[in-house]
Amino acid sequence: MSPHRRRIRAEEWVPIGVNALEDNALDVVRSTDNRSVIAGPGAGKTELLAQRAAFLLQTGNSPRPQRILAISFKRDAAANLAARVRKRCHPEHAGRLDSMTFDAFAKAIVDRFGQALPKDWRPQPNYELIFPFERDYRDYLSSIGAPPAQVGTRAQLMAIHAKTFERKHLFGAPLPEKPHVPANAAQWAADRYWRSSIESSSGSFLSFPMLGRLAELVLRVNPVVREALALTYSHLFLDEFQDTTQIQYDLVKTIFLGSSAIVTAVGDNKQQIMRWAMAMDDPFAEFERDFAAKRTPLFHNYRSSPDLVRIQHVLAQALDAQAVKPVSKTTGTVSGDSCAVWEFSTPNVESNVLAAFIVAQMKDHGLGPRDFVLLVRQSAKNYAALLAPALANYNLLLRNEAAEIGKVKLQELLSEELSELVVRFIHLATSERAGRSWSECQEALAHLRGILSDDDAARSRLGHEINDFCAGLRVKYPAPVSTEVEAIALVDEVLNFIGRKDLAASYPAYRQGDWIDKVAEAIALHMYESCTKATDWATALNIYEGSDALPLMTIHKSKGLEYHTVIFVGLDDGAWWSFDNDKIEATAGFFVAFTRAKQRVLFTYCAKRGARKKIDPLYKLLQQAGVSVVPAG
Ligand SMILES: Nc1ncnc2c1ncn2[C@@H]1O[C@H](COP(=O)(O)OP(=O)(O)OP(=O)(O)O)[C@@H](O)[C@H]1O
């Protein structure tokens, strides 16, 4: 049944696309107060948010013209939530959900209102985004010389750990309206850091944590803007709330605390894997206190088979002794062990055995390449170098999601609006039957150009324009491009047709700096790469989107995703070298990786890559759960 626009009475509303929701989930979907939902993996937390959006939009509980703001951690999680809502709601309803990442949200605020910041904090509008690492802070501290004598000494400066500098001194507290007069060496260094990032002679250089703090400040000192923003939203959803940083939480508080927006925060403490990136110790407790939110647990697991849920529970208890065992709502469909550690003599043998196994499983269970994921702890590129040729022997493509294309990560590139639009237009121009693409392209352009759905004349003109453009493109590019120059020209042509100005007007990220050019460059590079492996456009676009490629990614990138089979390559000290630094976070990472699987989890071990002494606790947990270690080649 296609979703309709008509308002549904709240009493008559039923969940869409799933058979049922557990009682607590339904209670949260219909709730009118602030809630925190803490539940294990696969409990349907993201699904609950999608259902709640549908409920609020379809019943009018989120009254027009107000909107719903959903904040996720990753671009694909944000896109996934929006897609689930689009699938279930009429476009006019789905269009009132703004689903984005925290970073995008903060950046959009600074991009829109940054010039209203107090002078000392006002960045140049064409600031550049930077991504500093711990070593950059270390280098900075050792490069800035000695503070003035009345403030402190160089020895005091050198005693500050780079992490403490970042967490406490740079971003630990909301920014004051006027910069502090530094009282000690750390404050002096932090103040200089901010000053040089904002006022350097070569422009402003801002990281996402800086944008978060600036966004909070601009709204705090401009109450009218803050109120307008708060009033825009009737409801706020916060997904993966366990990984919220103080910066993000302060921003949420400044905008929404005391506003009429109703907040729903969902997450799982056991999946907290971003403490290294400044996640708060216990964001749920603070949220419940500040927003008087009621905690509501969920008890089902809709993702994993009963046997995997049993093993997951052993891991869960290592992270939280009070964890309640969830009830699996699916059935096991694979024969043999649903989890094992496979030992290999060399990484080469490992790659070949895994490739053969995946191909056989695809055949046996009618699966596609994207039902599998190859997870690694880090250095995905090194693993890809071995695994890709082994898979290629079976005509399987590997897609390293962490690969950098120009200045953009592949995983990010593919969820860029511009990338999606360019692919749609090329598809429309180059395929014989592209009925759905045609209406998608028309819809997207009408939206960008502000053409209303009932303006028939403008829509018809737009239709002709699209047809003419695509006909021209078809003549110019009958086959996949064969040079990088050609790819750049093609992307440029499509981009100009879509309209840089209209894109910038609709998407703040494309308004700022040269991000749109970086994305366009990455699209062209990736398009060229994809074309080199194809003889026709359909195949080239397929390769571009990776719909038929097996994904390889780090644990961190796998958050929120799910696969039939998870293969974790390299359960050894080499990959988990920092295990001793934060055992809890490392175990949480292990838990996240494990819980992405619906039916099977395989770990691989190869002595050539490292011992398994440091991570013995992980092996012990598997042993405790009855998981066997077997020689596999
Ligand atoms: N009520 C339900 N009935 C059937 N399937 C469901 C239900 N709720 C969720 N699912 C399915 O279960 C899977 C897990 O749901 P979801 O991704 O929302 O879980 P989650 O709690 O956010 O997981 P995680 O924290 O592990 O990322 C998805 O495939 C989803 O479509």
Image (tube, rainbow, N blue to C red):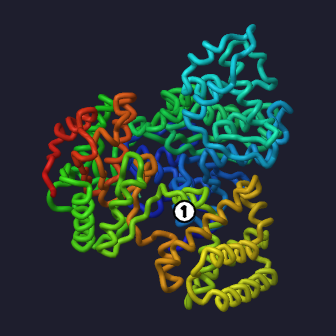
42, above or below 496, in the image: above
> Observer-nearest residue: 122 or 62?
122
475, above or below 31, in the image: below
Is 577 on the left-hand or right-hand side of 275? left
Q: Is mark 1 within 8 Å of ligand 1?
A: no
Image position, residue 467 (x, y; %): 70, 88
Image position, residue 417 (x, y; %): 64, 64
Q: Residues within 10 Å of mark 1 (few under 14, many from 20)?
A: some
Please state which amino acid type lies under the numbered disc 1: Ala
> Observer-nearest residue: 476 or 538?
476
Q: Residue at x 74, y 26 (%)?
A: 192
**Which SS class for mark 1?**
helix
What residue sits right under mark 1 in the picture?
A: 83
375, above or below 572, in the image: below
Q: Residue at x 66, y 24 (%)?
A: 173
Q: Given the current orientation, which residue lies at the most extreme top position?
A: 150
> Observer-nearest residue: 510 or 69?
510
Q: Residue at x 48, y 37 (%)?
A: 274
Can residue 110 be seen here? yes
